[in-house]
């Protein structure tokens, strides 16, 4: 038996599971089992979805209707539709009827074109108590479809820890008693790849994929879903994360240690597409672009998304010390060239077959310095930009090795590096302001840059025994209440500096200088995540969105375009992190930003897989149907109105004098542009006056965006809009009619 | 005097697009530059001179996420 090398030295210092190996795995007991005949994908769909209830140990196969395909397309759309049918209006995240629905979409699993292996997980989030969707690479999405299922719904709560296995080779779905004492991700994933792979061929493990979380997910709401793929070069399991929204916390609340899918029915035509030649032609064209241009453009193949580190710093967008600042002199220490040297180069790093963009970088042979695996050499996925920023400047640290260590434990313990990094940055500012102290933190000196104590907090969140660590893990939204109740901290101050919206922490871009990006983060379906619209350059630097109507148009188009990726199973990076050589000169600036040639590729790929004949306009309509459905879904769950589109002061502009004084000339000019003479005002007075101006601008933005989206003044999609989209499903219309008020309708 | 993305900027004799990018610290790799509505190829940024009075657009292609 060959051993996985993710732990790259003697395993004796590792967990007992590794020492036990297969002997432990033999103890897996079948609790429930169901046989099925795997449906073969046809034109990108298998036409079947699977429901597994780990509470009553039941299994169900559902047919996918043509109407469901038309209205919801797939992926996140299917997830929302299935979740809608399974929850109540009152469902909370930890109710048994809440589900984790995982679906890839009709293009998921295409190997000819880069970036086509994503799945989307949909659930009612513990952070927001409304629907959330979160995506991951890795092989789970494609293998699930090739195992016969367009989606899997996981419902119910098991009485004890279980593993759910979809084994298409055996034609079985099983709920197994978990043998794992250590439920952390690498432990579980490595063992399950080994268990389900051919013992005589280590690379047979590539036909297996595992979704897992970890101990931190049991004690915090930041639990992530890790999706694995077997790295045939390194001969280790790699983990990609559906990090956001707390999906991992739900997984562990359901007492699920892992979801496993296995199938050998894997090929470049497994989707049974209508037109393979078109896929091959378009794929070859993009591969050539990437190979020839990436080194001159974003360097995704060598630096991954970490190429953004120094760029964000230059443009004052790198979140520094809880988003107080956007730039720091020490940022050179986290320059992408530093990370490039730490990542292993010259090795294929795609997280799904055929992705020549290959941005899934990894640091190999890293020796852990803390925690239960201290002294062990490991391979670490990433850090990607978001982690390099969140567990970097945002908490005041400029030490890539430390960031790599937090990245490993985040994946292993199963928590989201974005929410956790932003959340701990908030804690650090509270600590430095004296809102909380060492008595509250149980001895931790949680100042910005105090690496040792921040790392200790991370380990305590995984252990779940420290009351302060558990409080932190509830997220900023609840921390504000809990710090006020338990420690007497000033709630008003925390409301101003806590970087969250709708209960979810802001991802790693300083939004305060772009009015459009206020919307890109805070006028979103699920909270401030960067997967709807990233408009800072268009708005603030390029000056392409001078009016509120221009901003609203961008806040209509881009969120819908990005939503489309989530319906069909795509990664967005090959869309605009590489561009054709003539993109910048062939199209006028406004159009070039959409990378028209790549958009056309996607239209043709959709048609080539499904046999349909959509246009680029249809693509937006497909997305808009689901976008508005999800908005109504939030409404159904008691959210989804204007008051939940909240924005903290820190996202609007400087809150404290030191933020102003870091860019005095810039902000003085902003104040003048707002009609206020800064002469004679203190920095704090200037902050307060600019905040007032920007708060008024925010309200104008909200109105303008709602109008453009076809929503009323309260942010509710109108029945007219639903009819236009063909989404006037009676139960959807009923929700709108329940909440919409005559006084909230626009007069024109 | 020229304008760059609508904002005035001092002009100097011999000024190239690269000079503007360096001054503005526009380090993003996916840039598209237009001088008086005429696109300039990326490989000509170092050598293309900017005439006095020009309207220069430096477009950062959307990215992130």
Image: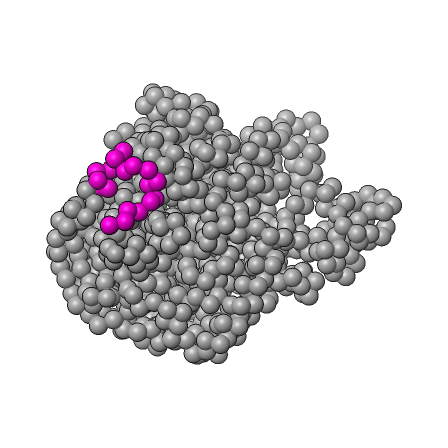
Residue at 66%, 28% in the rendered image? A681
Q: Is residue A492 above or below residue A61?
A: above
- Is A9 within the magenta? yes
Chief secondary structure of the magenta portion:
loop
- Where are the magenta residues, as a range? A1-19
Instruction: Give percent across and percent down for residue A498.
Output: 45, 37
| Front in this rendered view, residue A451 or A727 | A451
Specify whether residue A478 is in view: no
**Residue A479 falls in which quadrant of the image?**
top left
Compared with A331, A105 (above or below) is below
Q: Which residue is drawn at the image coordinates 57% and 63% (left, top)?
A: A288
Task: Pick the residue in front: A706 or A508.
Answer: A508
A5 horizontally vs A389: left or right? left
- The part of the image, by quadrant, that contains residue A598 is bottom right
The picture places residue A101, in percent across and down from the top left corner, at: 30, 59
Q: Position of residue A339 (x, y in %)?
A: 52, 40
On screen, residue A511 versus residue A100, left or right, reads: right
Q: Would you say residue A152 sits in the magenta stretch?
A: no
């Amino acid at each position: 038996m060959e051993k996985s090398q993710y732990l790259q030295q003697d395993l004796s210092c590792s967990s007992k599971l590794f020492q036990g190996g297969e002997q432990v795995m033999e103890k897996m007991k079948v609790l429930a089992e169901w046989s099925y005949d795997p449906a073969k994908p046809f034109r990108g769909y298998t036409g079947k979805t699977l429901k597994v209830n780990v509470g009553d140990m039941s299994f169900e196969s559902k047919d996918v209707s043509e109407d469901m395909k038309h209205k919801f397309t797939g992926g996140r759309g299917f997830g929302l539709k299935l979740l809608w049918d399974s929850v109540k209006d009152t469902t909370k995240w930890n109710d048994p009827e809440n589900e984790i629905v995982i679906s890839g979409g009709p293009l998921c699993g295409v190997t000819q074109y880069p970036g086509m292996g994503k799945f989307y997980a949909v659930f009612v989030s513990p952070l927001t108590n409304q629907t959330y969707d979160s995506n991951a690479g890795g092989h789970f999405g494609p293998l699930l479809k090739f195992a016969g299922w367009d989606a899997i719904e996981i419902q119910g709560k098991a009485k004890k820890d279980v593993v759910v296995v979809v084994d298409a080779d055996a034609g079985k779905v099983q709920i197994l008693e978990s043998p794992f004492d250590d439920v952390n991700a690498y432990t579980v994933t490595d063992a399950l790849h080994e268990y389900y792979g051919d013992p005589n061929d280590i690379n047979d493990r590539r036909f297996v994929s595992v979704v897992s979380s970890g101990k931190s997910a049991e004690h915090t709401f930041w639990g992530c879903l890790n999706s694995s793929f077997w790295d045939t070069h390194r001969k280790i399991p790699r983990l990609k994360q559906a990090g956001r929204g707390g999906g991992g916390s739900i997984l562990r609340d359901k007492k699920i240690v892992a979801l496993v899918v296995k199938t050998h029915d894997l090929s470049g035509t497994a989707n049974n597409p209508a037109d393979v030649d078109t896929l091959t032609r378009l794929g070859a064209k993009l591969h050539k672009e990437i190979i020839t241009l990436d080194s001159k453009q974003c360097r995704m193949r060598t630096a991954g998304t970490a190429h953004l580190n120094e760029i964000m710093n230059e443009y004052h967008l790198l979140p520094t010390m809880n988003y107080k600042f956007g730039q720091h002199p020490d940022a050179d220490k986290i320059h992408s060239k530093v990370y490039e040297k730490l990542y292993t180069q010259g090795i294929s790093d795609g997280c799904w077959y055929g992705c020549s963009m290959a941005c899934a970088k990894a640091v190999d042979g890293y020796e852990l310095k803390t925690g239960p695996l201290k002294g062990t050499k490991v391979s670490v996925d990433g850090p990607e930009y978001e982690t390099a920023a969140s567990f970097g400047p945002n908490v005041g640290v400029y030490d890539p090795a430390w960031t790599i260590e937090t990245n490993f434990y985040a994946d292993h313990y199963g928590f989201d590096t974005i929410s956790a990094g932003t959340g701990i940055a908030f804690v650090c500012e509270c600590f430095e302001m004296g809102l909380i102290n060492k008595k509250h933190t149980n001895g931790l000196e949680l100042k910005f840059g105090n690496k040792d104590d921040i790392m200790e907090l991370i380990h305590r969140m995984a252990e779940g025994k420290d009351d302060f660590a558990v409080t932190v893990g509830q997220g900023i939204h609840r921390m504000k209440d809990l710090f006020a109740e338990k420690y007497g901290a000033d709630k008003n101050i925390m409301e101003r500096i806590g970087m969250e919206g709708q209960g979810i922490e802001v991802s790693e871009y300083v939004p305060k200088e772009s009015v459009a990006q206020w919307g890109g983060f805070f006028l979103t379906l699920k909270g401030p995540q960067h997967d709807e619209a990233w408009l800072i350059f268009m708005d603030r630097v390029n000056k392409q969105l001078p009016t509120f109507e221009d901003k609203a148009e961008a806040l209509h188009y881009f969120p819908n375009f990005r939503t489309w990726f989530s319906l069909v199973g795509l990664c967005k990076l090959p869309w605009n992190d590489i561009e054709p050589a003539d993109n910048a000169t062939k199209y006028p600036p406004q159009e070039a930003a959409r990378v028209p040639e790549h958009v056309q590729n996607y239209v043709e790929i959709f048609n080539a897989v499904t046999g349909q004949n959509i246009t680029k306009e249809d693509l937006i309509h497909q997305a808009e149907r689901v976008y508005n459905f999800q908005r109504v879904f939030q409404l159904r769950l008691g959210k989804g109105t204007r008051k939940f589109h909240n924005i903290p002061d820190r996202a609007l502009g400087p809150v404290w004098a030191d933020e102003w004084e870091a860019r005095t000339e810039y902000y003085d000019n902003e104040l003048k542009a707002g009609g206020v003479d800064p002469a004679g005002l203190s920095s704090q007075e200037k902050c307060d006056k600019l905040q007032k101006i920007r708060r008024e601008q925010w309200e104008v933005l909200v109105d303008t965006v709602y109008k453009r989206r076809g929503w009323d003044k309260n942010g509710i999609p109108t029945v007219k809009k639903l009819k236009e989209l063909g989404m006037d499903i009676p139960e959807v219309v009923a929700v709108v009619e329940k909440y919409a008020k005559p006084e909230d309708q626009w007069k024109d | 005097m020229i304008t760059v993305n609508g904002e005035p900027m001092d002009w100097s004799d011999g000024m190239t697009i690269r000079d503007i990018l360096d001054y503005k610290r526009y380090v993003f790799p996916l840039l598209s530059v237009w001088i008086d509505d005429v696109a300039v190829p990326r490989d000509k940024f170092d050598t293309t001179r900017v005439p006095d009075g020009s309207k220069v657009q430096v477009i950062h292609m959307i990215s992130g996420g």
